[in-house]
Amino acid sequence: MRPARILLFIVMVFALLACLSVFYPQPGIEVCGLTLRFASPQRALGPSHRSGATAADRLREVEATMHAHADSAALADSLREADTLRYYTDFFERSPARISCPGNDHAFFDAFFDRLDNARTRPVDIFHYGDSQIEGDRISGSLRRRLQSRFGGNGPGVVPAVQLIPQAGFVQTASDTLTSFFGGGMMGRRSPTRRYGVVAQQVAFDSPSDTVRLSFATRHGRGFRHVTLFAGCVDSSLRAHLTTDAGSMGRRSLGTATRLQTMTWSWDRPATRFDIDLCGRAEIYGLSIDVGRGVSLTNVPLRGSDGTFFTRMDAENLRSMFDCFDVGMLILEFGGNALPILSDTADVERYCQGFGRQIDLMHRLCPEATILVIGPADMSVKVDGELQTHPLLEPLIDRMREVTLEGGAAFWNMYEVMGGRNSMPVWVDNKPAWAAPDYIHFTSKGAARIADVLWQTLMMYYDYKSLKNVSGNNHQACD
């Protein structure tokens, strides 16, 4: 065939496709039982999300609906404004960053804030459970730094004996003879004993004669002064020797017992690294690393988990380990991994009922803790050849919010904070990118921005509590 005829054929094909785009058939053309769909002119010219506001613009709008007081003087100045309380009420009712609280009670977090105010003398422990969105200490790490800077404390909280996902601020290594089991997600095998502890991980340790080593180091200069190792099912003696960059901290041992047991080391001079040499046989449920006071925030990422694994864990073992801490808040950030297995609203209902049972269990295990549920982020899938929000995401979020509130927990709508429908492509296109090209996960910068908004949101409720206290005292004085 002559080149001229080939060129003519190509031109005719493109002309035909152009005509089909102009006279776009809805929903398509049926051919031999198949539906052929064609791109509209708008889609052919490019995704519509590129012409709107950036993700940075959107978050600035969200942040404009709130403020955090810089100091008590700023708070006092705001009290001179007659509409200060109304300002907070408007935020609670209208801001995309607001938290939905049971009974619309804006004082829902007051008990938790009271504990934060006393954190420099009494520890406050927070556990952040989530899926791969919080891997690598994303979101958790930023929130931890903010809390510890304001209310005191240091250290990563509780870490597993074997850390498979590298953390941003901490480095862990362990002997390769240790076997890890996971309570949920797709990271590895399940334990036949179902005993995992608060980090949803069990490390099987069986070395009665040879020594294995766990090593930990912080990437920054701030040190810690307190390490506790949690173990169980010790059917022979377990011996441990801890050494820090401040020197040897001595040996500890545990006798035969199936219940949860602990080894604790404390010292005066801050240390930035330590090694634990272990010998014996046991299940290890994690190590607590801190300064013995202040705020401790534990990051528990479970890749692939939909958050319904708690009720499949040994409840007594979990309760015993929670009892070793002063748990002030539990954060549950799940939902995204449920979407791929949901086909209709009936599936949504079944999942949310199962998620509600997790909240009920956590209330029983930690009755004094405040529970905050963070809903899933936007997730893009191809619909008619174009990236769009997953069709069941909004029904899932709405039902998760209802079940959460019915269960006596608070709900933060991360999807709405991002910008709602079709916001994920905008986050991917942001400069720098705030979401990954998979249109599901945040980048480290995007996760940090989400953590910023969450922190500012919590401080709005914290400042509101302070405002009410000052206002109440002023009214009392006038009386």
Image (tube, rainbow, N blue to C red):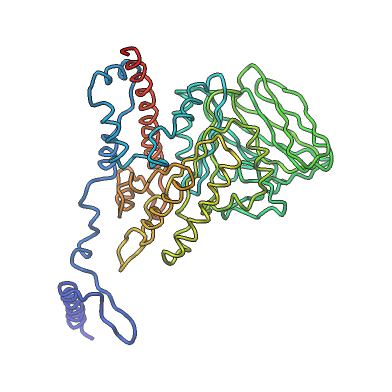
Q: Is residue 187 above or below residue 17?
A: above
* Residue 248 position in % (x across, y down): 72, 22
Horizontal placement of 155 versus 113: left or right? right
Horizontal placement of 478 versus 340: left or right? left
Q: Decide which of 364, 441 is in the foreground and name it.
A: 364
Horizontal placement of 307 versus 103: left or right? right
Report which quarter residue 143 is drawn in: top left
Q: Residue furthest top?
A: 477
Horizontal placement of 16 versus 221: left or right? left
* Residue 435 position in % (x across, y down): 37, 48
Total residue callouts: 0
Residue drawn at x 27%, y 75% is 37
Residue drawn at x 67%, y 48% is 314
Q: Decide which of 332, 83 is in the foreground and name it.
A: 83
Q: Where's the N terminus, which quadrant?
A: bottom left
Q: Where's the C terminus, which quadrant?
A: top left
* Residue 272 position in % (x across, y down): 59, 25
Q: Is residue 127 above or below residue 348?
A: above
Q: Decide which of 299, 45 is in the foreground and name it.
A: 299
Residue drawn at x 46%, y 53% is 335
* Residue 21 position in % (x across, y down): 19, 72
